[in-house]
Image (cartoon, rainbow, N blue to C red):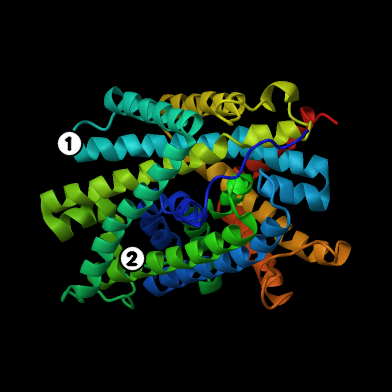
Amino acid sequence: MEDKLKGRYGFPVAFSMVVGVVIGIGIFFKAKPVLIASGLHPKIAISAWILGGTISILSGLTAAEIGAAVPETGGIIAWIRRVYGDKVAFLVGWTQAIVYTPAIVALIAYYFAFFTTQFLGVEAGPKYMLPLSAGALVLVFAVNTFTQRAGGIIQALATGAKIIPLAAITIFGFMSNNNSAGIFYTSTEAVSTKPPILLLGMALVPVMFAFDGWIYVGTISGDLKNVKKDLPKAIIFGLGFITIIYVALNIGLLKVFSADELVNQGMFGVAQNLFGNYGAKVIFLGIMISSFGGLNGFSLISTRVPYSLAIEGHFPAKNYFSKVEEKSNQPMRSAGLMFILSMVYLIAMFITGNPDVFGDIPVAIFWLFYSMVFLGVIILRKREPELERPYKVPLYPVVPILAILGGVSIGVYAAISNPKYMLISLLATLSGLLFYKK
């Protein structure tokens, strides 16, 4: 079937999409798990953030080549299809559509509601959080489905506003005279006997959750006015900007607080100690905006996933989900499915009382998919040498090979850290074979 979506976004929205999707709830909650995984060794934790940013930039440099050469709505699905065929691409899309994206959308909505209750000073329970999170889902899906331009404006505004709490904490940390802990101070509770290389790899897994989401800007490549120019720029400059922010934030925190203090107090306790109760309110407001920006970005991305699979003819009820409404130029039915799935996941989070598991399960398996994309760049160079490549990855093939090694190592360390989650991810992915339609 023909892809009927028309490009209307430029570089500013594409850049803000990368930053908006990646800088979400992860950075505000992952400083603690990274320190724990590192055995409370600040040097290892900081190294993990730097390594994670480096892997992400190498990955962005590599994926940008295939993204510009194959500018089709669907992003990673279209790229995998071009290299490995329909069935493998369907499995990626199936995992993204049914498991990963709606679960992440619901998780962000959940934490948006949590941050809102913290800001308002009310109980962080289902009484307030369920209507807040469900209402946020309705709002962002409605905006991105019925008024696409408004969704782009919200994304750009939210991206700018969310930098405030990150910048405040980072700057205050660097300017503070309290350097009693120091970033090179190793906690007295750091009793892990694991080798440093294993601790670094295990700390890398939660780091990559904080970086996850960057590749999904390719899902709206068909919506970009100049995809061949804007997509590589958005990924490269967006990831570089994010890496600097993440590393600076963690150095700033570890300059003021010891690893023990960060783990025991968490981000909210840190904000109260740094800025007082009123200052912490401002920080919570910034985190709310950050969460809403991530929710808006992921909801926009999610609406295209079933549509992309359907126009290729492999998704169940393909004729239904491949429809684009003429008046709005939007895949309304695809958006409706993702809204329903996101709401189901959201309700399940409140029922189980364990929302984080819905975000942990699919992340590791997707880094293996990313590695397939990086390998695909090398394969296409050999298989289709005449393919037009407006952008070529620098230092080829060194950069793609390093990206592949980085992606595979993340999957390996994730399997070591959480074998159950990796098994569930694999089973969820392979279940798509039951629904694959030739």
Residue for point 60% across, 23% down: 333
Relative to 189, is 117 above or below? above
Q: Which of marks 1 and 2 precedes in the sequence?
A: 1
The kind of secondary structure element at disc 1 is loop
Residue 211 vertical position relative to residue 395 in the rendered view, above or below:
above
On the image, the x and y values in percent for residue 143 come to: 43, 32
The residue type indicated by label 2 comes to Leu
Q: Residue at x 38, y 34 (%)?
A: 110
| Residue 144 seen anywhere in this rendered image of the structure | yes
Q: Is residue 38 visible?
A: no
Q: Quadrant of the N terminus?
A: top right
Q: Which mark is residue 313?
A: none
x 86%, y 62%: residue: 384
For the residue labelled by badge 2, is the local secondary structure a helix, a strand or a loop? Answer: helix
Q: Nearer the viewer, residue 210 or 148?
A: 148
Is 208 displayed left or right of 383 in the figure?
left
Which of the pair 13/257 is nearer the observer?
13
Q: Amino acid at mark 1?
A: Gly
Pointers 2 and 1 in contact (C-beta within 8 Å)? no
Q: Is residue 207 depicted above or below 346 in this figure? A: below
Residue 212, horizontal then vertical, whole percent? 52, 53
Residue identifier under label 1: 121
**Residue at the spot of label 2:** 249
Q: CA distance from mark 2 to mark 1?
A: 26 Å
Residue shown at 49% from the left, 54% from the top: 18
Q: Quadrant of the C terminus?
A: top right
- Give the side of residue 183 with respect to residue 225, left or right: left
Q: Residues within 10 Å of mark 2 (few under 14, many from 20)?
A: many
Q: Is 86 left, or right, of 424 in this rendering?
A: right
